[in-house]
Image (tube, grey):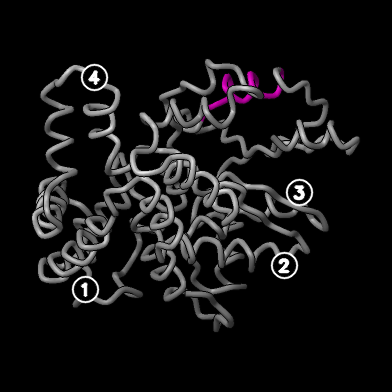
Amino acid sequence: MATEVARREGLPDPVPVTEVYPEVDDTDESAWQDMVIEHLGLADWVRIPIYGASDLLGEVGQAGLLHRGLLWPPAFHVKQALFASAAGGSLLTGEGGDEVIGAHRVTPLMLLVRKRRPASRALLSASSAALMPGPIRRVAARSEMVRSGYQSWLRPAVAERHHRLLAADEAGEPLRWDRATWWLRHRRAVHAVLGCYHALGAEHSVTVAHPLLDHDFLAALAAAGGRWGYAGRTALMRRLFADVLPDEILRRTSKASFDRAYMGEATREFARAWDGSGVDPDLVDPEALRRAWLSDEPSTLSGLLLQSAWLASRPATVTGGTA
């Protein structure tokens, strides 16, 4: 959309900026990226190769922690090159894409009732879950967290309370598609992310904007979707971008993963020698946390604890910080 508007108004083309992680296969989206750039015919493309520096405890992450203190999400500390690439200018992000464009609570009902999809067991189950009263949906969400071992490094009583609060938050999604769209925008996590973007942008004199979370865009989208919304992500992508992108991109279902990029060898090296300090043992089981950091599938959900533990191991006094 930015490219189309720029050419229509006689302005310079926007410049795509892409972080590339050559050492982590899970992050590879090069085929999709090449397809977009080729389709748009963009001559300039800034690709930032990131090796060990992407680790939450890599050289860049450590410098950010000592400068700013703890941030959430913790990956903001390794975005120095991204913001520097736009210094003095503007940066458009895709923040909110998963939440806004993805399926909402009402989506299975929309498929069953409005689109008359075959009543498969999976679709009937999802539709039933969408219609459950709030208390039952909260119980179901908590049960799934327990079953999956969600944040297994928490002490049992802490995990129970955390899962209960998180389930209540998740179960708060309105059934109507238009109301759910606004609800997604005003969740606390979204405000925290946007606040950090603003703060880091200010460090580099960068104006940061998030088109998919823009109030005017969401107002128009909610009005267009109404009570029922759209038949999932692909349907909404086609509604928004069919005139500017090939359908192969719009119907894509795969997604990259960055956990291994953010929690690699620097994380593992720290975890092996960690003495358990820097986290509250009444809330967290240090040995379970260490096992999570050293596992083959580390989770960035433990990233803030990782950085807190690292800061506690440093003799220097940290100033500043954003919660």
Q: Earlier in the sequence, mark 2 or mark 1?
A: 2
Q: Earlier in the sequence, mark 4 or mark 2?
A: 4
Magenta residue check for 268 = no
Q: Nearer the viewer, residue 227 or 51?
A: 227
Q: Which callout, 3 or 4, points to the residue nearer the camera?
A: 4
Q: Earlier in the sequence, mark 3 or mark 1?
A: 3
Q: Are marks 4 and 2 in contact (CB under 8 Å)?
A: no
Q: Nearer the viewer, residue 316 or 239?
A: 239
Q: Is 52 left, or right, of 259 in this rendering? A: right
Residue 117 badge: 4
Q: Is residue 311 above or below residue 102?
A: below
Q: Could you tell me what secondary structure mostly forms the magenta stretch?
A: helix
- For marks 4 and 2, give the CA distance: 50 Å
| Residue denoted by label 1 | 283
Q: Which callout, 4 or 2, points to the residue nearer the camera?
A: 4
At label 3, which amino acid type do we have?
Ser
Q: Secondary structure at mark 3?
A: helix
Q: Earlier in the sequence, mark 3 or mark 4?
A: 3
At label 2, which amino acid type do we have?
Glu
Q: Which callout, 4 or 1, points to the residue nearer the camera?
A: 4
- For marks 3 and 4, give the CA distance: 46 Å
| Residue denoted by label 3 | 85
Which span of residues is magenta-colored? 28-38
| Residue denoted by label 2 | 203
Q: Are marks 3 and 4 in contact (CB under 8 Å)?
A: no
